[in-house]
Image: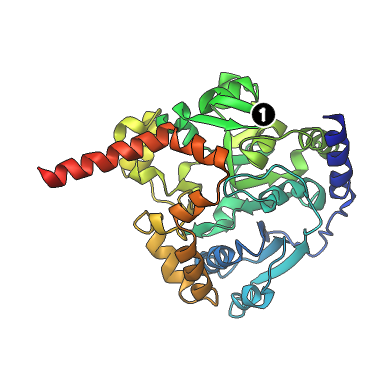
Amino acid sequence: MERRKKDREEILQLLFELEPLPSMAIREGDVVAVLSSDSVYEPHLWVTLTTMAESADKTRNYRLYILDGGIKNKLAIEHIFKKYQNFKVEFIDMTAQFNGVFESRSVSRAAYYRLAIFLLFENFNRVLYIDADSYILSDIAELFDVDMYGKQIAGVRDSINYEIPWREKKIKYPRYSGKAVDYFTDYLQLTPERLGKYFSSGVLVFNMDQMDLNRKKKDLKRLLLRDYYCHDQDILNLLFDEDQIHILGREWNYFNSGPILREEDFFLEEEKENYLGSKLKPKIVSYVLKPWLKENLDKPYVREYWTKLEKSPYYQEVQKRMRKNTKLRRFLRLSLKEKILFLTSKEAFQKYRSILNKRKDKES
């Protein structure tokens, strides 16, 4: 354990040697937005940036910083903004950063790049962060200008925590085994009040000038020595106390998984109304159900994604990946232990039951 900790400390030393970016070119009224991507998420970043530009206020200036984990076709990204004079894009090389951090499921180390905001943007007053797999339906300037009432960070509650199937799900990873909802109180040791403000890391506003950045960096260095089931999102939540967080409306981080849930799946009435009661109009859609997976082609906002992507240089590449990346192929890539765990899971039994019920319906 001590050896592993020492190795992690040495790897992370590079992160804390990052030089802060100059802010002299940022003028009052400029919107500063950060996104991160590697080559795998590059096509999805193209969709996010395209919808961002199309939804933007033509009278505002936008400074975009791409935390770059190996983007291959930067010209394709830059080409998006050829007809938008009010956008400027800068790529920041992150390929040497966050090596050795905990990766699992669809989360790679590129997800951790947003944590570098505390170092790279310490000279900025405010920074907006948006995930690379988003669909922008409104002007992000409105979000950048939001009144945070002196709070340090703004985000939307992670709606998955308010879905009963997720709360009851058994999760297992090297540091914890048990119900998902208990992970937050047992492993993260969040109080009920703090858990009520647990936010998604997909869309965030950082009030940099309200933070004690030296303290944040010290805490970040400590937290990065541990592994977390929800990766960088858990770390961000542990960095802020409940009185430092401003909760944004669901419209700013609308999970495309929500609308397909049943009424009884919602832990909170408010969340049920957000998704099933037509209470709000989404401004940013977060692709919890990934549109590039074949099983999600009929899910909310997936058609819009493919309509945009069809105009990109990545269309054929993503289609090819989708044909290869089926559920069966993903299952076959698992280790024997992982296969057994999946086949004996509650999720698998529910799937078997669903198949049997469909067969009975056909026979009757």
Measured along the vertical axis of the image, is residue 97 above or below residue 45?
above
Residue 69, quarter of the rendered image? bottom right
132 left or right of 113?
left
Crowd class of label 1 (few under 14; some 14 to 19; many from 20; radius 10 Å): few
Judge by depth and name the residue closer to the eye, 249 or 355: 355
Q: Secondary structure at mark 1?
A: loop
Q: Residue at x 39, y 50 (%)?
A: 281
Judge by depth and name the residue closer to the eye, 16 or 323: 323
The residue most toward the left is: 364
31 left or right of 249?
right
Q: Residue at x 67, y 41 (%)?
A: 232
Residue wearing tag 1: 175
Residue 207, quarter of the rendered image? top right
Q: Which image quadrant: the N terminus?
A: top right
Asked whether residue 301 appears in the rendered view, the answer is: no
Q: Which image quadrant: the C terminus?
A: top left
Residue type pointed to by label 1: Arg
Q: Residue at x 67, y 57 (%)?
A: 36
* Coordinates of residue 71 in the picture (x, y in percent): 69, 67
Judge by depth and name the residue closer to the eye, 146 or 187: 187
334 left or right of 306?
right
Measured along the vertical axis of the image, is residue 15 above or below residue 58?
above
Judge by depth and name the residue closer to the eye, 186 or 144: 186
Measured along the vertical axis of the image, is residue 163 above or below residue 63?
above
Asked whether residue 341 appears in the rendered view, the answer is: yes
347 left or right of 199?
left
Q: How many numbered badges does the structure rendering display?
A: 1
The residue most toward the front is: 336
* Coordinates of residue 275 in the picture (x, y in percent): 36, 42
* Coordinates of residue 237 in the picture (x, y in percent): 65, 34
* Coordinates of residue 279 in the picture (x, y in percent): 35, 42
